[in-house]
Amino acid sequence: MISISYKKHNEIVKGGNTMIIKTLSLDEEDKNVFVNTYILNDYPKYYQQDKRPAVVICPGGGYSTLARKEGEPVALKMNTMGYHAFVLHYSIGFTEKPSEFINEEDLPPRNLHAAWPIQLYQVQKVFQMIKDHAQEWNVDSDQIMLMGFSAGGHLSASYATFGREIMGDIYIKPVALILGYARLDMLECDYKEKLERPSGRILTKYKNLVLFGTENPTEEQRMALDPLSHIYGGMPPVFIWHMQSDQQIKSSQALNFALKLFEYHVPHEIHIFSSGVHGCALADKVCASQKDHYDESCEMWPELLRRWLKRVITENTGR
């Protein structure tokens, strides 16, 4: 039985010492920017080590919202593998989460503090926070991974590819990069069917406003924020998974990213599942918000990741 410590804002309610969950603010100007921690406490030692690796998770949502099921459920799954987890609620294009994307007049006010590249700095801030509290939280500060889904995958891939160019000396390199149905090619057009839907057009418009400051970015602007174009030989190992049936982001983006990783001799593993829908997260019955979000094929990805990470962490620690 798992007992949980929970901190909401500045109030801590203790229910045991197995897991510590805290909500920690990251931005005084934007109350919606924070990190939720899922810190394992007093579990048997992972690989006989005193300190555990950690993963920072960036949910998707088109930079206009954040998908809950790509946050806490994934963090808890990573906990079962023996990793501390931290879910980043980064800046999005609205002051609060929109209930739907059907009519623009029903959307909440725009968040003027969400202009790119603030999200990259928020990822760095979480990495620095983990390093600063590594002793307290029992984290191996040299073993911090980065994971992202969809738009959160774009953020994660951007951080791992060209984040160092933007941040310079304060950049902290992840030990591994994990990408789920991520936006990796900013030059590739969206599916025509997506843009024909009101929700698709609205999401695309406000995503572009956050990333580029305009509804119609130029090719040069897109190239500047394109992870595929910024792959380099010193990148961390990458785990990629996607679905051939994804109707939001083409699986060819994952394939092209993997091919370029191969060209630069970056260690990587890629899985393209024949079925599954965009936004399926764990693709299991626990976090499936719709019937078609449960998929027995995609449900395998956490186990495939567990095996891959075991090799990556072992190679990096020498254990």
Image: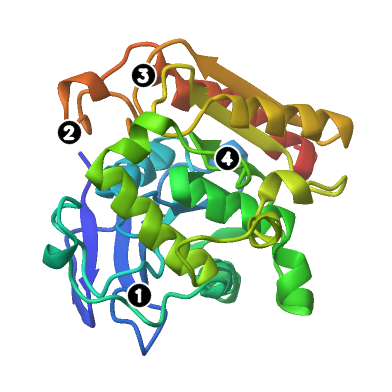
Dot label at residue 178: 4
Q: Check if mark 2's residue and mark 3's residue have beta carbons within 8 Å.
A: no
Q: Check if mark 2's residue and mark 4's residue have beta carbons within 8 Å.
A: no
**What's the coloring here?**
rainbow
Label 1 CA crowd tier, 10 Å (few <14, some 14–19, many 20+): some
- State the separation of the CA atoms marked 2 and 1: 27 Å
> Please, what secondary structure does the residue beneath circle 2 have?
loop
According to the image, label 2 marks what residue? 289
Q: Nearer the viewer, mark 2 or mark 4?
A: 2
Mark closest to the chain's N terminus, 2 or 4 = 4
Dot label at residue 24: 1
Q: Looking at this view, is 107 or 289 the one in front?
A: 107
Residue 74 at what x, y percent from top left? Answer: 36, 41
Q: Looking at this view, is 101 or 295 the one in front?
A: 101
Amino acid type for the residue under numbered disc 3: Gly
Residue 230 at what x, y percent from top left? Answer: 77, 51
* Total tally of numbered discs in the picture: 4
Q: Is residue 262 left or right of residue 18?
A: right
Residue 104 at what x, y percent from top left? Answer: 19, 62
Q: Looking at this view, is 257 or 108 the one in front?
A: 108
Q: Nearer the viewer, mark 4 or mark 1?
A: 4
- State the separation of the CA atoms marked 4 and 1: 23 Å
- State the separation of the CA atoms marked 2 and 4: 23 Å
Mark closest to the chain's N terminus, 2 or 3 = 3
Q: Nearer the viewer, mark 3 or mark 4?
A: 3
According to the image, label 3 marks what residue? 276
> Please, what secondary structure does the residue beneath circle 1 have?
strand
Amino acid type for the residue under numbered disc 1: Leu
Amino acid type for the residue under numbered disc 2: Ser
